[in-house]
Image (cartoon, helix red, strand yellow):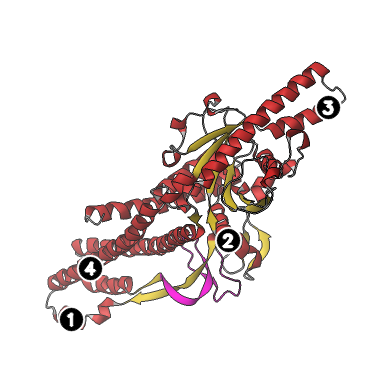
């Protein structure tokens, strides 16, 4: 604790010299007013000395759409510090974007050593959390380890007590249902409204003024009591190292990269398998075996696109069926921020696409489909037909069309089994990483996050323009594909008794 004079403190001093709070609150819950209240009471000001510290438009929808995480540093009268991580991007669910997770992860990695508390502001007059708040919680629950659950608190705004809130604990998402719950009817918001009324052309009469002063004084006393209770609770929380958040996000990135690789291979394997099955049908129909054999060789001598590790990072396209290494050995420092890649990687033009990303000059896709990987797309040719010389010789020495047909049928069957084995191996690897992630993450499963993202996009798409609906439809299909692959990997892993 600082040696500064505690007598200047409006709040009861706490033991920790520095407290870091991750603040979540959708538009309209009074997040800016809450930040102002913290600034004022930590500075030791009384209710009649309150002043606005942050611009009112900070709660506006326009700013929320454009802003990334911000750090507000509040110095208390006794020298202790409060660091508030504001998350405006999470306030606007209509702009659902994986970049929200990336931006927050990047911000924490660059600027935060530890987190003491995740504080969710929610409108206590509503019966349920808004879609934006649920989205923000789903993002947080995929990024933070299970241990953070004891450091999560809800602050119901616009009500003076949790008992006066319409928000029931039972309506909260399961992972945070047992979180600490407080309530505050922000006295600063009332004070600012009071000052505005006094300066209006039709100020309230003295009797009404006195009633408002008494209401503000009552809310101030209750607010200080609530904040004291909150900081006393935070003071007792075990600090959550940011390193754990970074590790978990790194694991989810590993899963995303593996998922991208597996998705690409599954698509290519399925195409090859379909062609082989057609050849089997031609054999059954007793068509020309020599011609089928030539087709078979052309089918199995295929180039498969796969990730190959590199010592440097490259800008790769992740759009479906696009295997472009758009910028190898990218000089831009490794980043998880796709907007940063779009703005500063020289391969992108300044032209914005319909999804708000920058257009790649190499592949034509948006920067929102690009990512830094320490890997690159490469084509690997599979030529088993040339490797098995004995099988080739036996085929050539076969005396009849029937013998050749049966031999070729056997080769095709073995190749299909090999392809199936490749899929099983991919699913096992993906399932293993997914299971490790699920055990560590607060959400308990990445599939849940994908499901919520899909539902959210569907909700937004219902009311959007034709162009927006088409764009969102593409996002939904991509997420549904990811979800289906992860669910399949989990089922196959469970069937083998690996879980």
Measured in 3D between alpha carbons, the distance from the residue under mark 2 to the one under mark 3, in whole angstroms, is 48 Å
Q: Is residue 52 above or below residue 69?
A: above
Measured in 3D between alpha carbons, the distance from the residue under mark 1 to the one under mark 3, in whole angstroms, is 101 Å
Query: Closer to the camera, 93 or 315?
Result: 93
Specify few, some or many for label 4: CA neighbours under 10 Å numbering under 14, 14-19, or 20 or more.
many
Mark 4 element type:
helix
| Residue 477 appears left or right of 469 | left
- Specify whether residue 132 is in view: no
Measured in 3D between alpha carbons, the distance from the residue under mark 2 to the one under mark 1, in whole angstroms, is 55 Å
Write down the residue under mark 4: 412
Measured in 3D between alpha carbons, the distance from the residue under mark 4 to the one under mark 2, in whole angstroms, is 43 Å
Q: Which residues are magenta?
A: 306-335
Q: Residue at x 55, y 51 (%)?
A: 97
Q: Is residue 329 magenta?
A: yes
> Of callouts 2 and 1, which one flags the residue occurring earlier in the amino acid sequence?
2
Q: Residue at x 39, y 54 (%)?
A: 440
> Of callouts 2 and 3, which one flags the residue occurring earlier in the amino acid sequence?
3
Write down the residue under mark 1: 396
Write down the residue under mark 2: 338
Between disc 2 and disc 3, the foreground one is: 3
Q: Is residue 33 magenta?
A: no
Q: Quadrant of residue 364?
A: bottom right
Write down the residue under mark 3: 198
Query: Closer to the camera, 248 or 131?
Result: 248
Query: Closer to the camera, 20 or 249?
Result: 20
């Amino acid at each position: 604790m600082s040696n500064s004079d505690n007598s200047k403190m409006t709040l009861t001093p706490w033991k920790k010299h520095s407290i870091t709070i991750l603040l979540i609150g959708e538009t309209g819950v009074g997040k800016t007013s809450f930040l102002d209240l913290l600034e004022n009471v930590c500075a030791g000001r009384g209710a009649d000395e309150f002043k606005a510290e942050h611009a009112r438009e900070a709660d506006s929808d326009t700013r929320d759409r454009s802003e990334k995480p911000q750090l507000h540093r509040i110095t208390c009268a006794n020298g202790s510090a409060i660091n508030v991580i504001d998350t405006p991007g999470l306030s606007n669910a209509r702009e659902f974007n994986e970049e929200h997770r990336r931006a927050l992860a990047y911000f924490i990695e660059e600027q935060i050593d530890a987190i003491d508390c995740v504080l969710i502001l929610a409108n206590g007059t509503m019966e349920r959390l808004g879609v934006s708040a649920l989205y923000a919680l789903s993002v947080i629950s995929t990024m933070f380890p299970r241990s953070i659950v004891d450091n999560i608190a809800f602050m119901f705004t616009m009500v003076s007590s949790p008992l006066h809130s319409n928000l029931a604990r039972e309506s909260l998402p399961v992972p945070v249902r047992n979180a600490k719950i407080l309530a505050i009817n922000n006295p600063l918001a009332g004070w600012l409204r009071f000052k505005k009324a006094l300066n209006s052309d039709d100020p309230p009469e003295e009797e009404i003024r006195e009633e408002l002063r008494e209401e503000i004084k009552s809310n101030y006393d209750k607010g200080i009591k609530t904040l004291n209770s909150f900081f006393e609770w935070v003071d007792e929380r075990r600090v959550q190292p940011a390193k754990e958040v970074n590790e978990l996000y790194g694991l989810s990135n590993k899963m995303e990269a593996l998922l991208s690789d597996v998705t690409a291979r599954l698509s290519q394997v399925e195409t090859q398998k379909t062609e082989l099955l057609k050849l089997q049908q031609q054999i059954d129909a007793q068509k020309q075996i020599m011609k089928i054999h030539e087709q078979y060789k052309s089918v199995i001598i295929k180039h498969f696109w796969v990730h190959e590790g590199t010592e440097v990072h490259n800008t790769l396209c992740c759009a479906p069926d696009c295997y472009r290494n758009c910028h190898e050995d990218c000089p831009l420092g490794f980043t998880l921020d796709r907007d940063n890649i779009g703005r500063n990687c020289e391969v992108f033009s300044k032209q914005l696409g319909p999804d708000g990303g920058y257009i790649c000059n190499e592949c034509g896709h948006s920067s929102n489909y690009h990512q830094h990987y320490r890997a690159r797309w490469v084509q690997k040719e599979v030529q088993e037909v040339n490797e098995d010389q004995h099988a080739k010789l036996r085929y050539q020495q076969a005396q009849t069309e029937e013998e050749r047909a049966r031999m070729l049928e056997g080769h095709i069957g073995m190749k299909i089994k090999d392809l199936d084995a490749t899929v099983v191996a991919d699913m096992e690897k993906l399932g293993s990483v997914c299971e490790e992630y699920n055990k560590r993450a607060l959400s308990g499963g990445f599939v849940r996050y994908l499901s919520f993202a899909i539902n959210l996009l569907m909700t937004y798409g219902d009311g959007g323009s034709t162009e927006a609906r088409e764009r969102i439809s593409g996002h939904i299909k991509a997420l549904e594909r990811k979800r289906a692959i992860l669910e399949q990997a989990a089922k196959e892993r469970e069937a083998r008794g690996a879980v």
